[in-house]
Every structure is written in C-alpha cells, then in structure tokens.
Image (cartoon, rainbow, N blue to C red):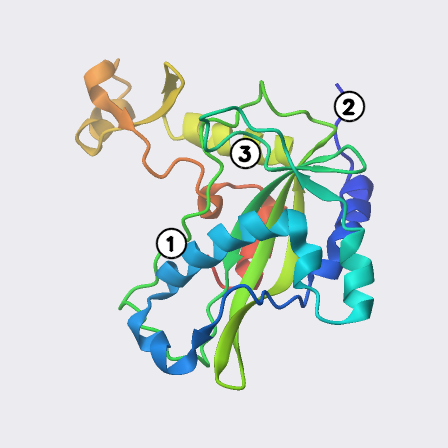
C-alpha cells in the first residue's frame, strides 16, 4: 500500500502554519499564581484545552488576517465511537488526511513555575490502541503542537510556537520495533516488557514464561519512539 512521502507531509504542514504564533485566549493564569503549578500540571491542562479547541480554532483569532487564515484551516473532529474516550484518529482534514494531535509542552524558564528537582518526562504517547491495522499509511499523520506558556501584561496564555508533522505509519513501526528489539512482546493486545528480575535470564538466552513479563507502562511515550525526525523535533525544544 502506498505511504506518505516527505513532500506530502511538508505540503500538509504548510496548511497548518497559521497555527504557529496563535495565542489561546480560552485559558489564562495570573503570573503570581504560577508558583503553585508544576510544568507537568500546566501541560495536562493546556493539552486538554488544545484538543477541544483545535476544530474551532478560528474562534481564537483576534485579528482579521488570522481569522481569515484559521477559518480555512480545514480540521474537524473525527467521528467517535460512543463511549470510547480515545478513538483514533482525532481529526479529519478537508484534504482527506487524518490527523492525530499530541501536545508538546515547552517550559518557559522566564516564568516562576514550581519545578521539581528532576524534569518529568512528557506524558504524550501513541498508545497501544493505535496499531498497524488501524493506521492508513497514505493518509495518517501525527501532529505535534509545541505549546509554551507566555506572559502578556500580567496574564499567562498558551501560545503555539511550532508544529511538527510526521507519517503515523513510520512512528508506529519505530514504536513497535523498539518493544521487540528490547525483548518485549505483545500479549492479548497488551505491550509487555521483561521484568527487571528476569533480565539476566533473557540475556543468557533462557526461555521465558508469562511470569517473566509485565505491562510496559511507558509504552508509546513520544520520547521513547526512535523515529529520527520526531526525536529531532523534541530535542529542538529540550524535551529529551
């Protein structure tokens, strides 16, 4: 089956360029309140808001030029199965391409957030519900929206500072290859990794049993998907 070419991905990204620089007015925090929030807490709030706002993003435009561009962004929420909170994909574009959105929160060192001693790993992931069987190779893309909290006259708003677009099929292949190359496996649709206590037996070439495996609780985290263009984008914003 044909797959997305880099030229197609770049052309599609151009359609989403109007998002860059957009200030999301639906959420604001007074700057004095920031010390009560960790960056990871802010990230969850912003990513949830972004997922809901993107199909009606034209409502966020504050000047006529941006309004004209964003009205024709062409994204609409994909049909969801009743009762299924995380159906795939998130959006359908008017061009026919399908878009899965993930937010990448970019910390702003100029803001006084409550930062933990060690940086937390971004929680965005491609979960096991997205598999090679439900990805359409020539139509599905992963859109990574880099969002940063910025201060304007004492209030802090999320601002989309960049957009990354990647063929979904390539990301899923890299995600799954990493699991298998580390000795992991799929069991009844659940990704499993070798328990730490069984690693020595695996390294010695012994045959493992079900008790030697456990669910991979970090499966699909974007930081751990070894697809080079995705890694480069995340490194650009110091999230790796």
- Counting residues from the start of the chain, the first of labels 2 and 3 encountered is 2
State the SS at label 1. Answer: loop
State the SS at label 3. Answer: helix
Question: Which residue is found at the position 25% from the left and 26% from the top?
Answer: 214
The disc at residue 174 is: 3
Tag 1–tag 2 contact (CB < 8 Å) = no
Q: Residue 124 versus residue 60: which sits nearer the camera?
A: 60
What whole-number distance in Å separates the C-alpha atoms at marks 2 and 3? 18 Å
Nearer the viewer's eye, disc 1 or disc 3? 1
Question: Which residue is found at the position 73% from the left and 30% from the top?
Answer: 139
Question: Which residue is found at the position 43% from the left and 57% from the top?
Answer: 45
The disc at residue 3 is: none
What whole-number distance in Å separates the C-alpha atoms at marks 1 and 2? 34 Å
Nearer the viewer's eye, disc 2 or disc 3? 2
What whole-number distance in Å separates the C-alpha atoms at marks 1 and 3? 19 Å
Q: Residue 231 versus residue 124: which sits nearer the camera?
A: 124
Q: Name the residue under label 2.
A: 2
State the SS at label 2. Answer: loop
Q: Name the residue under label 1.
A: 121
Residue 157, compared with residue 60, is above or below; it is below
x and y percent of residue 15 in the render? 79, 51
Tag 2–tag 3 contact (CB < 8 Å) = no
Question: Which residue is found at the position 58% from the left and 18% from the top?
Answer: 133
x and y percent of residue 114 in the render? 31, 72
């Amino acid at each position: 089956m044909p797959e997305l070419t880099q030229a197609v991905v770049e052309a599609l990204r151009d359609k989403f360029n109007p998002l860059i620089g957009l200030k999301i007015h639906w959420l604001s925090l007074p700057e004095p309140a920031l010390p009560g929030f960790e960056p990871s807490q802010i990230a969850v709030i912003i990513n949830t808001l972004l997922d809901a706002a993107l199909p009606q993003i034209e409502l966020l435009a504050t000047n006529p030029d941006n309004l004209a561009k964003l009205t024709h962004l062409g994204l609409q929420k994909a049909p969801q199965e009743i009762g299924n909170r995380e159906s795939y994909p998130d959006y359908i574009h008017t061009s026919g391409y399908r878009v899965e959105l993930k937010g990448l929160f970019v910390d702003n060192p100029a803001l006084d957030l409550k930062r933990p001693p060690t940086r937390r790993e971004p929680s965005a992931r491609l979960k096991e519900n997205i598999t090679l069987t439900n990805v359409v190779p020539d139509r599905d893309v992963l859109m990574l929206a880099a969002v940063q909290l910025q201060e304007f006259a004492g209030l802090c708003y999320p601002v989309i500072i960049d957009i990354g677009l990647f063929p979904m099929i390539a990301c899923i292949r890299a995600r799954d290859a990493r699991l298998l190359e580390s000795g992991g496996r799929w069991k009844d649709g659940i990704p499993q990794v070798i328990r730490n206590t069984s690693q020595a037996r695996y390294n010695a070439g012994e045959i493992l049993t079900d008790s030697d495996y456990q669910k991979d609780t970090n499966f699909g985290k974007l930081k751990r998907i070894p697809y080079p263009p995705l890694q480069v984008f995340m490194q650009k914003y110091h999230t790796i």
